[in-house]
Amino acid sequence: MGARKKISANKRKEALKTVYFAKLQNVPTSPRKMRLVADMIRGMEVDRALGVLKFSSKEAAGRVEKLLRSAVANWEQKNERKAESGELFVTKIYVDGGATLKRMRPAPQGRGYRIRKRSNHVTLFVDAKNTNDNQN
């Protein structure tokens, strides 16, 4: 690796040390359905978001709840302390489309209808309230 690449790689690593996030990739749900769940918790306090996800009837809510717990655990490990109630917030959450499996379903008169089985990637960022106030 060249010196320039090494310097930029080290800068990226240092920047990631102050960002607390978790990723969920290749979820076999359509991105549209997952975005409905993501919109429910965007900007919420973590404890409240966990409650909303726990009692949501959507199937994707269970996956996002697990992802949120993972992001909180990442925050706790990087800061070497437990998160207090009301301290952490969901700063950003976004859903990107993943790979699409293309299948054919038999149709009348020898035709075939195309079925697209979509998947998605979810990225969730959490941060403490005091750092959010400093940035705004």
Image: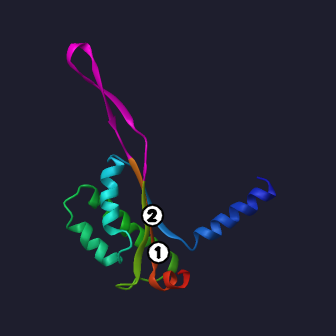
User: 40 and 102: which one is in front?
Assistant: 40
Residue 121 appears at what percent x and percent y?
A: 42, 52
Instruction: Please give the range of residues in magenta.
Output: 96-119
Q: Is residue 97 above or below residue 65?
A: above
Question: Alpha-carbon neighbours of circle 2 within 10 Å: few (<14), some, or many (≥20)?
Answer: many
Residue 61 appears at what percent x and percent y?
A: 27, 60
Q: Secondary structure at mark 1?
A: helix
Kind of residue at disc 1: Trp
Q: Which residue occupies 19% across, 67% down?
A: 55
Farthest residue toward the right? Answer: 3
The residue identified by callout 2 is 22
Q: Is residue 40 left or right of residue 136?
A: left
Residues tagged 2 and 1 counted as in contact (Cβ below 8 A): no
Farthest residue toward the front? Answer: 136
Residue 75 appears at what percent x and percent y?
A: 47, 75
Question: Alpha-carbon neighbours of circle 1 within 10 Å: few (<14), some, or many (≥20)?
Answer: many
Real-space Cα separation, disc 2 to disc 1, in angstroms:
10 Å
Q: Which residue occupies 19% across, 60% down?
A: 57
Q: Is residue 74 above or below residue 136?
A: above
Magenta-span inclusion, residue 113: yes
Quarter holding residue 10: bottom right
Q: What's the mark number on residue 92?
A: none
Q: Secondary structure at mark 2?
A: strand
Magenta-span inclusion, residue 21: no
Q: Which residue occupies 37% across, 67% down?
A: 68
Quarter holding residue 94: bottom left
User: 9 and 38: which one is in front?
Assistant: 38
The residue identified by callout 1 is 75
Is tag 2's residue or tag 1's residue first in the polypeptide sequence? 2
Residue 135 appears at what percent x and percent y?
A: 55, 80
Kind of residue at disc 2: Ala
Quarter holding residue 115: top left
